[in-house]
Image (cartoon, rainbow, N blue to C red):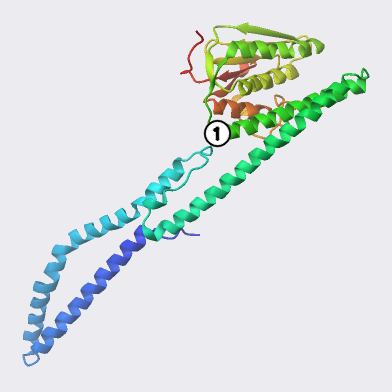
Amino acid sequence: MSRPPSIFQRLTLGFALMSLIGGCVLLLFVGLEYGLSSRARRDEIRFVGIANEVADHVVTPLLVLIVPMGLATLWVIRSSLRPLALAGERIEAAQAADKGFRVEAHDFPAEATGFADAVNGLLARLDEAATRQEAFAADVAHELRTPLAVLALELDRLDSPDGQRLKRDVSALSRLVDQLLILAQLDAQAAAPAAAAAVDLSEIATEVVSQYAALAIDEDKALALEINDAAVVEGRREAVAAALRNLVENGLRVTPPGGVVTVTAGPGARLAVIDGGSGLAPERLAALSQRYRRGDHASPSGAGLGLAIVARIMAAHGGRIATRPNQAELILAFPSADRNRP
């Protein structure tokens, strides 16, 4: 299906047709008037007179005025449509996280303010729907955390294999709820940015390693920690810790018994996890960083959310998740402008 002509093309064509029709009508009237006034003359003399009259009083003025009139017409059309072009550029530049974005209706011509108001109404409804969804996810996560914690305490009393299996399932479900809560917090942060806090990457690495040391021992694996002049970055401490926990969980899952998972803080604004797996290619990492994708490095507790959450957390902090498959290493790289630890 062919694209309809633009407003500029339609207006230009309209002005051209009006000029052509007006010129033809003017020629006709001049010819009729001169012909009637010289009816008594011979036909040849009358024809020459009409031609001279048309050339002197119609064609020559039209040729003189057609260029400036055409330029003036183009300028008027472009000036009238410029607000629409500027609005399109602003909408194109708007990001998904720019909630509350609205089109400036007062910049539009009067004929287009209805369109601007309709667009703003649609944006307002979309913002409201997104806010409700974020609030729902946060409420669900908060409501589920308490009963899951109580259930985990009750399962601690069971020493049977079934009890241990149920405890692992509850623990996995608790981590999923925490991930959903982090997603809701990130969305809320994007909607209403708050002041960032200083996050010491070495403290984060130490805390996460201590949390998973017992699990690594139970699975006959080693969990090592290396601190190498790590930086202090600006961000949300719980979100950065959650990103590193996801990588450690994945590393422990793909590492065979007897293997080692190494967590490194630094040098600079980076955290890294080296596991005993086969590594993750960049294109595979990009695929797993999308929601609802699963793979060897997908978190067993996240229904495909693990690496997607890590990617979201890093994007919210202005960083990225990277991979070095030849070393089976996943890296959380924060912006280089972040200040170093004093």
Q: Is residue 169 above or below residue 37?
A: above
The residue beneath circle 1 is: 190
The picture places residue 158, in percent across and down from the top left corner, at 92, 20
Q: Which residue is drawn at 47% across and 59% down?
A: 2
The picture places residue 61, in percent across and down from the top left corner, at 12, 68
Left or right of residue 153, residue 326 in this image: left
Q: In this view, does 64 lie above or below 164?
A: below
Q: Residue at x 83, y 25 (%)?
A: 150
Query: Is residue 300 among the parts visible in the rendering?
Result: no
Query: Is residue 188 among the parts visible in the rendering?
Result: yes
Q: Residue at x 11, y 68 (%)?
A: 60
Task: Name which quarter of the figure residue 113 lies in.
Answer: bottom left
Q: In this view, does 249 lie above or below 283?
A: above
Q: Nearer the viewer, residue 59 or 220?
A: 220
Q: Which of 92 and 197 is in front in this view?
A: 197
The picture places residue 283, in percent across and down from the top left corner, at 60, 28
Left or right of residue 316, residue 139 in this image: right
Q: Which amino acid does label 1 sit on?
A: Ala
Label 1 element class: helix
Q: Is residue 164 above or below residue 95?
A: above
Packing grade of label 1 (10 A; few <14, some 14-19, many >=20) is some
Task: Name which quarter of the figure residue 127 lies in.
Answer: top right
